[in-house]
Image (tube, helix red, strand yellow):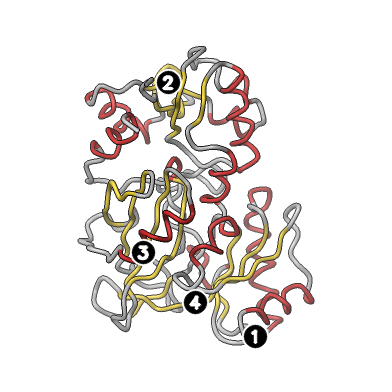
Amino acid sequence: MPVPAILFPADPLNPRRPDPHFAWEARLLRESGGEHHLVDHDALLAGQAEEAVRRVPRDSGPLWYRGWMLPSARYADFGAALTARGGNLLTSPPGYAAAHELPGWYGVFEGATPASAWIPSDGPVAPGPAELAAAAARLGGSGPAIVKDYVKSRKHEWHEACYVPDLADLPAVGRVVARFVELQGEFLAGGVVLRRYEEFERADGGPESADHATGGGGSGRAGDAAGARSTGGAAGGGPDAGGRAVEARVWWLDGRPVLVGPHPDSPRQSVEPDLTEVRALVRTLGCRFVTTDLASRADGSGWRVVEVGDGQVSDLPRGIDPSGLLTSLITA
């Protein structure tokens, strides 16, 4: 069988080299005997997929992508442009959307992740009061919640555009949602999500909240649109926005965990999550290459899934050795 190659974003200042954020992965891949090609991420975002993949050799066969996040529609264009050149993304566009956007994976993980309700949007327009009231009612109509879109939150603007102290206060819900949509602007992904706030164990031993919204799964972001996913929820905020939750990121390939480590926002944490329940859920989801971000409950009752992400756009914590992950990808 053909050996898969991995596509990395090119350095915008030197298109013949990998983007500096992914250069270490490209180097480790070469040392492992793998091959990589470069794509123009800016061109992909601009809707110029054919131009973006022009450096990928024709008839390149099976391909993985490791890079900055792409909207699902742009990823579909990416796949079509590669297919036209004889390449084949091993994560299909439907598979990417299912893992990358909360509505795609929530049905499988419901009960193992904070309760959520969402309102689709065609653009950066905040939902009206009636839509927000209906979404809040689906979460019980009271209690604290987090605001995010299908992919990300604004956890660094916690009180302004992320945290809602009580869903019963609909004017406050409206204010936080409106500010969130304003800040996301053209990068609003899919729609607005209301997600139940939960408390998780904090690295210093106290309780910590999770913004279950986004940190996303990939590389400590390079901007709201193009960042790699850094966590999927934001387990690093809280009513007082202090500290980091005890959070793990698990990398799954074909339903098997191939790398377990800390969340990229807290790379020095030591984590040993219980994967018993999550393993079956990942297999049910059926996506080939995904990540799950898990946080330990503050009451000690176990681990919760705070985010699911596509593994191609999920960031690695600095200090971890991804050689086994990269080897697994090129031997898949």
Q: Left or right? Give the position of 153 relative to 209.
A: right
Q: Amino acid at mark 3?
A: Leu
From the image, tell me which residue sits under label 3: 294
Q: Left or right? Give the position of 306 relative to 83.
A: left
User: Which of the image's four quarters has the C terminus?
Assistant: top left
Q: Residues within 10 Å of mark 4 (few under 14, many from 20)?
A: many
Is there CB contact under 8 Å for labels 1 and 3? no
Q: Residues within 10 Å of mark 2 (few under 14, many from 20)?
A: many
Badge number at residue 104? none
> Mark 4 to mark 1: distance in Å?
13 Å
Q: Residue at x 27, y 26 (%)?
A: 27
Q: Amino acid at mark 4?
A: Tyr
User: Which of the image's four quarters has the N terminus?
Assistant: top left
Q: Residue furthest top?
A: 58
Badge number at residue 197? 4
> Mark 1 to mark 3: distance in Å?
26 Å
Instruction: State the SS at label 1.
Output: loop
Q: Residue at x 40, y 27 (%)?
A: 6
Q: Left or right? Give the position of 22 relative to 111.
A: left
Instruction: State the SS at label 3.
Output: strand
From the image, tell me which residue sits under label 2: 37
Q: Quadrant of residue 209?
A: bottom left
Is there CB contact under 8 Å for labels 2 and 1? no
Is there CB contact under 8 Å for labels 4 and 1? no
> Mark 3 to mark 2: distance in Å?
32 Å
From the image, tell me which residue sits under label 1: 141
Instruction: State the SS at label 2.
Output: strand
